[in-house]
Image: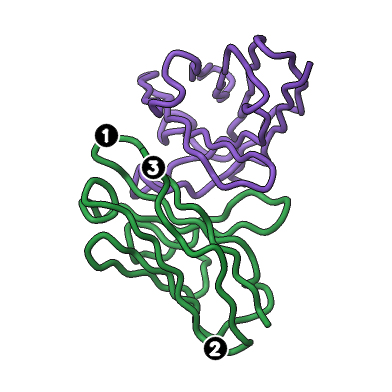
């Protein structure tokens, strides 16, 4: 079945970087954009950016420009999101989400989420 | 980019209809027909319920419907059921070629 499986929980110190993976299966990985969305505990959803797995093209929310990098490895159908210069406010669940086949602007398949905790 | 504005909470009795609003600007909701709605149960990933303002993905109940007027989009749930109790988020494409989510609405079935 179509699914996205993310890497496990991470605990990082302030100032460090984290790299979360998102492995796709059940569909052609290079045919659909991958987006990243995060959610702090008890808070709303926050869009971080998108990546086209075919071209590698990316687009980031202004808030994360300069701190986030989205990449992929097409040979293993895996997308990555790396966030640097971590601070306590980055503590959240990070989701990858696939764009819908008919529109890039809706996300129909979501990963299970990866908890990232930033603490000294 | 500021989050789209949603009511914090909406409630209704089983069988009733409720509507959740999502207010943005002409640079997002009002400027494009790219509004989506997501349902999120506690501890779970969001689920796509509506895309492109009013389209339902395969498998989503026809009790869910979407619409838009000006800078405000709406999600209506008819025949409210206990399993509809969840958080709901709207999202929209923006003039900056980004996405923005709404503040979220907690739906309670009384």
If you read the primary sequence from the N terminus, does the residue marked by circle 1 or circle 2 appear first? 2
Q: Examine the rendering and report whether any part of residue A71 can be seen.
A: no
The picture's colour for chain B is: green
Nearer to me, B18 or B84: B18
Residue B13: x, y in percent?
62, 87
Answer with the quarter of the image where residue B6 lies.
Answer: bottom left
Q: Going by the image, does A12 lie left or right of A26?
A: right
Image depth: mark 2 or mark 3 in front: 3
Label 2: state its secondary structure. Answer: loop
When the figure is inspected, residue B33 is found, relative to residue A75, above or below; the finding is below
Nearer to me, A37 or A27: A37
Chain ID of residue with mark 2: B
Q: Going by the image, does B69 lie left or right of B6?
A: left
If you read the primary sequence from the N terminus, does the residue marked by circle 2 or circle 3 appear first? 3
Crowding near the residue tagged with mark 3, few <14, some 14–19, many ≥20 C-alpha atoms within 10 Å: few
The picture's colour for chain A is: purple
Q: Going by the image, does B29 lie left or right of A82?
A: left
Find disc 2 in the rendering and name its residue.
B16
Residue B95: x, y in percent?
24, 39
Q: Are marks 2 and 3 on the same chain?
A: yes
Answer whether labels 1 and 2 touch (C-beta < 8 Å).
no
If you read the primary sequence from the N terminus, does the residue marked by circle 1 or circle 3 appear first? 3
Disc 1 versus disc 2: distance between alpha carbons? 38 Å
Q: Residue at x 54, y 88 (%)?
A: B16
When the figure is inspected, residue A111 is found, relative to residue A83, above or below; the finding is below
Chain ID of residue with mark 3: B
Label 3: state its secondary structure. Answer: loop
Find disc 3 in the rendering and name its residue.
B2
Q: Residue at x 73, y 51 (%)?
A: B43
Q: Are marks 1 and 3 on the same chain?
A: yes
Crowding near the residue tagged with mark 2, few <14, some 14–19, many ≥20 C-alpha atoms within 10 Å: few
């Amino acid at each position: 079945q179509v699914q996205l499986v993310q890497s496990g929980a991470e605990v990082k110190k302030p100032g460090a970087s984290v790299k979360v993976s998102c492995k796709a299966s059940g569909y052609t990985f290079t045919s659909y954009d991958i987006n990243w969305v995060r959610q702090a505990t008890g808070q709303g959803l926050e869009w971080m950016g998108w990546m086209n797995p075919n071209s590698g093209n990316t687009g980031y929310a202004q808030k994360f420009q300069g701190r986030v990098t989205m990449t992929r490895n097409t040979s293993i159908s895996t997308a990555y999101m790396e966030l640097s210069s971590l601070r306590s406010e980055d503590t959240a669940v990070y989701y990858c989400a696939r764009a819908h086949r008919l529109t890039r602007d809706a996300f129909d398949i979501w990963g299970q989420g990866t908890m990232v905790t930033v603490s000294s | 980019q500021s989050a789209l504005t949603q009511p914090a909470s909406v409630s209704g009795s089983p069988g009733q209809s409720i509507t959740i609003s999502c207010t943005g600007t002409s640079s997002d909701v009002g400027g494009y027909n790219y509004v989506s709605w997501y349902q999120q149960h506690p501890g779970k990933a969001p689920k796509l319920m509506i895309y492109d303002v009013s389209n339902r993905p395969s498998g989503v109940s026809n009790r869910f419907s979407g619409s838009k007027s000006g800078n405000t989009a709406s999600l209506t749930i008819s025949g409210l059921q206990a399993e509809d109790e969840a958080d709901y988020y709207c999202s929209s494409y923006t003039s900056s070629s980004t996405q923005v989510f709404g503040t979220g609405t907690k739906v309670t079935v009384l």
